[in-house]
Image (spheres, rainbow, N blue to C red):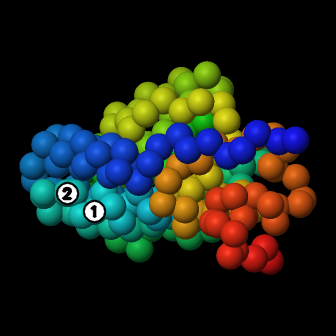
Amino acid sequence: MSEPPRRLLSSGQLAEIVARLGSEISMAHPGGVVLVGVLKGSVCLMADLLRQMTVACEVDFLALSAYSSSAMRVQVLKDLDIDVTDRDVVLVEDIVDTGLSARYVLELLMGHGARRAQLCALLDRPSRRIIPLSVDYLGIDAPDDFLVGYGLDLAERFRNLPDLVALAGDDLGEGRAGLEQQLYGPGSRAR
């Protein structure tokens, strides 16, 4: 029998973390900042972070292909729509693991002419880091559990959970009907 999903952070705890991040970014950028999110995982964080900003800010999104170990890189599927030349930019990520994708995007932002590119991450797993990378605005260090909710997904599911939930290894397989009932309640139906 698998372990039940474990709530890592409640919606209230997430709100406190995001309020702190918004305050830190606002204080560091009194003249304004461009927030760049990576689709799709950063959407919930970005929406809440925007509401916490107390300085002028613009928002844009990038979409990347999944990291491919065979190609040792990601591809940009959607690039920026706004010009970041000579502007301060904060990359907003849901989670940083190896650092490969985040480093790639930070270099891309600098290549687009950003004056400064910094990293904001809700979650960081420095134990999985492959390349040196520091997070300028950090929510919390994350455990090695598989996490869903608040933008993080399992096969495009569970992003809409208001809490951040850790799943057991048994939950990651094909039969997810029981998992959906545990996470959404007894009235939910698996697709």
How far apart marks 2 and 1 lie (CA) works out to 5 Å
Q: Position of residue 68 (x, y in %)?
A: 78, 48
From the viewer's perspective, tell me whether residue 15 is left or right of residue 96.
left
Q: Position of residue 21 (x, y in %)?
A: 28, 44
Q: Position of residue 48 (x, y in %)?
A: 33, 61
Q: In the figure, residue 184 lies in which quadrant?
A: bottom right
Number of dots carrying numbers: 2
| Residue at image coords 64%, 66% | 185
**Residue under pointer 1:** 50
- 138 to 190, vertically: above or below: above
Foreground pick, 45 / 177: 177
**Residue 89 in view (yes/no):** yes
| Residue at image coords 88%, 52% | 173
Q: Quadrant of the C terminus?
A: bottom right
Residue furthest out toward the left: 30
Foreground pick, 7 / 17: 7
Q: Where is residue 113 in the image (x, y as percent from the top left)?
A: 35, 53
Q: In the figure, residue 50 lies in which quadrant?
A: bottom left
Q: What element carries label 2?
A: loop
Residue type at numbered disc 2:
Met
Q: Find out whether the residues at labels 2 and 1 contact each other: C-beta distance under 8 Å.
A: yes
Q: What element carries label 1?
A: helix
**Residue 84 in view (yes/no):** no
Q: Which mark is residue 53?
A: 2
